[in-house]
Image (cartoon, helix red, strand yellow):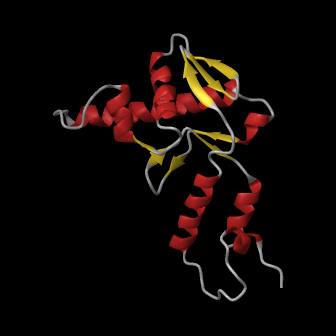
Amino acid sequence: MELSNFQQSFNLSEKDDFFLDQKLVDKMRIIADYQKNFSGYTYEVIEKDFVFNNKFLSLQKKNKMLLVFSYFCLKKNTPVSRDDLVENIYFIKNNVFTSRRRLDSLNHNIVKLISRARNLAYHGFSDDESRFIDWFPYDPFEKKWRLFRIKNDQYEKLFLTA
């Protein structure tokens, strides 16, 4: 009997007879997402431009957007939390007393900034190669964002059959 794509992807043999619970599938999905994030794409911020695979996205007169892209480039596509973004975009440390109302406002502003950055990147890099990029995806399990994730139907089909 031939092994399924799922079994081949995670080195499971035909003899592995067990039931996959939802948590295991979720963990495997996170691992697969992590593995497909770094497939040869280059990105950096040069002066006031975000460069992705030698294509430029101008961030002139968009200072907060420049900070968002710069911080995500600095983190090298590792997950970034809302608190990290508030601290590094608005320069407000967690240990400084801030009212609950102001923190709520800053958290809301971060979500708006990420949404705007996602929209800017999506429209700025709308060529054939970039259509497989998911910009600023949010991971609800970790409650963190990444700069990008590679969209791949093969990975989606793999988990739908699990």
Closest to the observer, 81 or 98: 81
Left or right: 29, with 8 as reference point: left
Residue 51 drawn at (x, y percent): 63, 23
Judge whether 139 appears above or below 94 on screen. Answer: below
Residue 101 drawn at (x, y percent): 25, 34
Left or right: 104, with 79 as reference point: left
Quadrant in the rendering for residue 15: bottom right
Residue drawn at (47%, 37%) of the image: 75
Judge whether 154 appears above or below 99 on screen. Answer: below
Residue 47 drawn at (x, y percent): 53, 14
Residue that extends furthest to the left in the rendered view of this protein? 97
Closest to the observer, 99 or 80: 80
Residue drawn at (58%, 66%) of the image: 28
Judge whether 70 appears above or below 8 on screen. Answer: above
Report the label total: 0
Quadrant in the rendering for residue 94: top left
Judge whether 90 appears above or below 154 on screen. Answer: above
In what quadrant of the picture does the C terminus appear? bottom right
Instruction: Tell me if I can see residue 97 in this picture.
Output: yes
Residue drawn at (32%, 32%) of the image: 87
Instruction: Tell me if I can see residue 161 in this picture.
Output: no
Residue drawn at (74%, 29%) of the image: 126
Residue that extends furthest to the top in the rendered view of this protein? 61
In what quadrant of the picture does the N terminus appear? bottom right
Residue 22 drawn at (x, y percent): 54, 73
Left or right: 130, with 141 as reference point: right
